[in-house]
Image (cartoon, rainbow, N blue to C red):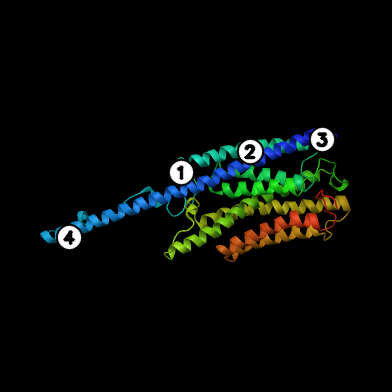
């Protein structure tokens, strides 16, 4: 065990602050991309509608002229041809396959570049915290939140290699900034040694899987929230209503969001299952029992049950659409409750928030 290094801890805090600032810039850039792209699509829609009106008016003139002259106007020249436009493929929602299109969205590209810089700075903060403490940097709430935010953004950026999920950028970076601010303002803890129960290699195994699973659940939470918005928007448009959520045209349809969220939740659920199993093994080695109905253990199991219910209901009971989205959101709210309220306000063997009692 390396000695505690306060200087490295101070460097870590500086890196965390810089990372939070960089994420904020990326968040603004992603929001700008949604707003600008939505405005551009709206303008093109209006132009296409105007062109369609012109073609229809011209067709009426041709029909009138043909009838006056006694000519047959039933052929192509007498019909109002539907104008073709690239807008028709994107005016409603982005592609359901979430593949990269040919268009150049400069704000989105800039946002991704800034996010990459931010995650590199954030990685430096996590590493210096680990060096300063001489251990893995997830022994208290501050470290869990900062490391968790790092993984959330890192997983999001890695997913961009295969899928065009830039529409999630505003929500993912926004959540990361909230996590970083909460860690620094509410849960800040100086570099210190771990309590005896945490001084085990199981800390690396158990908590790292928990953090990764929670990161995946964060992505699916954002997708489920967008799914609800998109579903409401699609129903409004189908009923002939006014589109008040123009930026959602850059987001895939509700079904595509639901399918991707389901697949990611499946991976996260497997990880959470291992979290529960390894936690029980660690508990047996630390306290001589696999299960003791400690508050933390109970809520970890509650999360597992909620996501198991979500997967079962969607796969076998036909719980799709908004019901599936609400179940996914409920699971993530349980995750938040477990890592905030339970850690801080409930006394037990898992009271490792690092905050003074």
Dot 2 corresponds to which residue?
118
Sort mark 4 into few (<14), some (14-19) or many (20+) by Cα contacts within 10 Å. some
Dot 1 corresponds to which residue?
101
CA gap between label 1 and label 3 equals 48 Å
- Residue that appears at 58% across and 38% down: 114
Marks 4 and 1 in Cβ contact (< 8 Å): no
Q: Indicate which disc, 2 or 3, sits on the residue closer to the N terminus.
A: 3
Q: Secondary structure at mark 3?
A: helix
CA gap between label 4 and label 2 equals 64 Å
Q: Secondary structure at mark 1?
A: loop
Q: Secondary structure at mark 4?
A: helix
- Residue that appears at 62% across and 48% down: 174
Q: Indicate which disc, 4 or 3, sits on the residue closer to the N terminus.
A: 3
Sort mark 1 into few (<14), some (14-19) or many (20+) by Cα contacts within 10 Å. few
Rendering coords of residue 266 (x, y %): 63, 54
Sort mark 2 into few (<14), some (14-19) or many (20+) by Cα contacts within 10 Å. many
Q: Indicate which disc, 4 or 2, sits on the residue closer to the N terminus.
A: 4
* Tag nearer the camera, 2 or 1: 2
Q: Secondary structure at mark 2?
A: helix
Marks 4 and 3 in Cβ contact (< 8 Å): no
Q: Indicate which disc, 4 or 1, sits on the residue closer to the N terminus.
A: 4
Which disc is residue 6 wearing?
3
Q: Is residue 84 left or right of residue 293?
A: left
Quarter where residue 189 is shown: top right
């Amino acid at each position: 065990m390396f000695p505690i290094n306060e200087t490295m801890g101070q460097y870590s805090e500086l890196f965390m602050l810089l990372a939070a600032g960089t994420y904020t810039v990326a968040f603004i850039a992603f929001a700008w991309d949604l707003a600008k792209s939505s405005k551009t699509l709206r303008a093109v829609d209006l132009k296409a509608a105007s062109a369609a009106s012109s073609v229809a008016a011209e067709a009426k003139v041709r029909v009138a002229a043909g009838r006056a002259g006694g000519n047959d106007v039933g052929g192509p020249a007498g019909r109002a041809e539907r104008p073709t436009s690239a807008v028709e493929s994107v005016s409603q929602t982005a592609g359901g396959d979430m593949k990269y299109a040919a268009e150049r969205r400069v704000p989105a590209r800039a946002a991704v570049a800034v996010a990459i810089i931010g995650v590199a700075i954030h990685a430096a903060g996590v590493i210096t915290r680990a060096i300063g403490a001489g251990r893995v940097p997830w022994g208290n709430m501050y470290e869990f939140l900062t490391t968790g935010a790092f993984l959330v953004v890192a997983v999001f950026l890695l997913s961009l290699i295969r899928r065009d999920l830039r529409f999630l950028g505003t929500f993912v970076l926004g959540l990361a900034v909230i996590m970083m601010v909460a860690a620094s303002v509410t849960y800040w803890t100086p570099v210190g040694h771990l309590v005896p129960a945490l001084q085990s290699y199981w800390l690396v195994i158990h908590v790292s899987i928990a953090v990764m699973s929670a990161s995946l659940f964060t992505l699916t939470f954002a997708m489920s929230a967008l799914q609800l918005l998109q579903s409401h928007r699609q129903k409004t448009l189908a009923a002939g209503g006014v589109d008040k959520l123009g930026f959602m045209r850059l987001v895939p349809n509700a079904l595509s969001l639901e399918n991707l969220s389901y697949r990611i939740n499946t991976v996260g659920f497997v990880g959470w299952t291992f979290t529960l199993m390894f936690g029980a093994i660690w508990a047996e080695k630390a306290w001589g029992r696999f299960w003791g109905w400690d508050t933390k253990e109970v809520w970890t199991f509650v999360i597992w049950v909620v996501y198991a219910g979500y997967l079962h209901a969607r796969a076998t009971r036909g719980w799709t659409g908004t019901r599936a989205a609400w179940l996914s959101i409920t699971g993530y709210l349980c995750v938040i409750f477990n890592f905030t309220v339970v850690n801080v306000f409930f006394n037990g063997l898992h009271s490792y928030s690092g905050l003074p009692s």
